[in-house]
Amino acid sequence: MKIAIIGYGKMGKTIADLASEMGHEIVLKATSTSPATENNLTGCDVAIEFTNPDSAVDNYRLCLENDIPVVTGSTGWNDQKEAVAKMVKDTKGRFFFASNFSIGVNIFFQINQQLARLMNSQKDYQPSVEEWHHIHKKDAPSGTAVTIAEQMIEALDNKSNWKLDENGPGAKDISIKAYREGEIFGTHRVSYKSEIDDLTIEHKAHSRQGFAKGAILAAEWIVNQPSGSYGMSDLLKI
């Protein structure tokens, strides 16, 4: 498979190295100073995109308009979700988004949803989310933390929003605390706390390899799919 890497930072380099080990060919390594274009995308089977909110949507448009399936882990563009969905529909393209490509995290998502349903009737417990990432991560909270909080809101009748906990959340908010320390690859913790006890679930990444492998598996999978928008639940069938 011929892969274009759009965003050749630490994550992009990890994906490129692992994809090569898995027998794929990296035909483009696009950066902010040497961006992807219609010409240098020619011949690519799929693009794997890890950039930032400022450039991600333009990268999606470029790939979709040139009939190249795109797999992306960029976050922070939630305000443009409807526009991206329309773009996928209008181009009859193939689009795969995950806030986190780790298989372990996506199993964690399923546990989080089930736990939130169980805790819905337990009003004495206050839910919260904490996340830790490296100091280079630009967005806060992480896309994974937002996904976690949105899953909880869907199940908890007394919570309607999430809020980055800078000055304290409101009564109907789920608090998200975001920490940026050292070179942490990603830790996410969900807690339900009461005066009697605490209940906590946590996922901790030890390297970027899990994220890279998930992105490559998504790329291998999407090239054989019909047009549409997909995510890890489609790939993992969970």
Image (cartoon, rainbow, N blue to C red):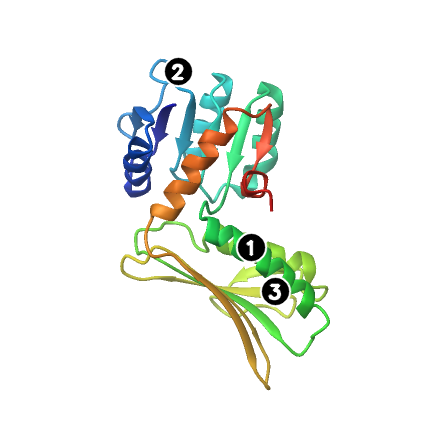
The residue under label 3 is which amino acid type? Answer: Asp
Asked whether the residues under the numbered discs 2 and 3 touch, taking CB atoms below 8 Å apart as contact, a structural biologist would say no
Q: Which residue is mark 2?
A: 38
Disc nearest the viewer among 2 and 3: 2
Disc nearest the viewer among 1 and 3: 1
Residue 20 horizontal side relative to residue 56, left or right: left
Q: Position of residue 179 (x, y in %)?
A: 38, 63
The residue under label 2 is which amino acid type? Answer: Glu
**CA–CA distance in space, label 1 to label 3:** 19 Å
Q: Earlier in the sequence, mark 1 or mark 3?
A: 1
**Which class describes the residues within 10 Å of circle 3: few (<14), some (14-19), or many (20+)?**
many
Q: Could one spot residue 46 in this view of the protein?
A: yes
Q: Position of residue 204 (x, y in %)?
A: 40, 60
Give the image quarter of residue 15.
top left
Q: Is residue 238 above or below residue 41?
A: below
Q: Please identify the quadrant where the N terminus is shown.
A: top left
- Asked whether 206 or 53 is in front, the reply is 206
**CA–CA distance in space, label 2 to label 3:** 44 Å
Secondary structure, mark 2, is loop
Q: Which residue is mark 3?
A: 173
- Asked whether 18 or 63 is in front, the reply is 18
Residue at image x 30%, y 51%? 136
Q: Which residue is mark 1?
A: 109
Give the image quarter of residue 93.
top right
Residue at image x 59%, y 23%? 226
Residue 194 horizontal side relative to residue 36, left or right: right
